[in-house]
Image: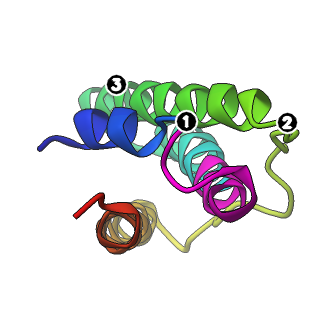
Amino acid sequence: MGILSWMKEWLRPDRGGPSRILIDLMAAHQDELRAAAQLRAHAERVPYPQVGQTLRQLADVEEEHARAFSERIAALGGLPGAVSGPLYEGSNHWDRLARDSRIADDKRRRYLEQAIRWSPE
């Protein structure tokens, strides 16, 4: 199951009620917004135009994920937040890319853990 398919399943209204899932949704929304903002900031500082284009495309995907979470949060009566705090600046291009990769890995791991928690089986 791809991440978008999983997200659609996870965001179904009958996944455990708003009180339990709202906290996870709001945290996921923040993670997606922060990742998108950071990827866009890093795309502006990358020395290779094709890498910058790829980072912007990845940011678009993260923003699509954030919109899906935002819609579900609103449907449950919550208020999606905005990104707060500073973004990771890094010491150079490679350091920023390594951080972006770790963030993606961390999100993937958290979403898998949540998929297990919210799984109907």
Q: Quadrant of residue 87?
A: bottom right
Mark 3 = which residue? 53
Q: Secondary structure at mark 1?
A: loop
Please, is residue 72 above or below residue 46 in the view? above
Residue at figure coordinates x 48%, y 25% from the top left:
64
Q: Position of residue 86 (x, y in %)?
A: 80, 63
Other residues around mark 3 within 10 Å, as few (<14) / some (14–19) / many (≥20): some
For the record, the magenta segment spans 14-29
Horizontally, residue 6 falls left or right of residue 71, namely: left
x 85%, y 36%: residue: 77
Inspect the image, locate mark 1, and give the three-letter code of the amino acid beneath it: Pro
Q: Is residue 81 above or below residue 75?
A: below
Query: Residue 67 versus residue 84: which sits nearer the camera?
Result: 67
Q: CA distance from mark 2 to mark 1?
A: 12 Å
Q: Nearer the viewer, residue 10 or 91?
A: 10
- Is 5 magenta? The answer is no
The amino acid on which the numbered mark 2 sits, given as a three-letter code, is: Gly
Q: Secondary structure at mark 3?
A: helix
Give the image location of residue 118, x and y in percent. Answer: 40, 62
Query: Which residue appears at 47% of the width and 67% of the height?
Result: 92
Return the residue at label 2.
77
Among the two numbered marks 2 and 3 on one chain, the one whose residue lies closer to the N terminus: 3
Towards the viewer: 26 or 20: 20
| Residue 90: percent from left, percent from top | 56, 71
Colour theme: rainbow
Is residue 49 placed above or below 119 in the rendered structure?
A: above
In three-dimensional space, the C-alpha distance between marks 3 and 1, rounded to whole angstroms, equals 36 Å
Q: Earlier in the sequence, mark 2 or mark 1?
A: 1
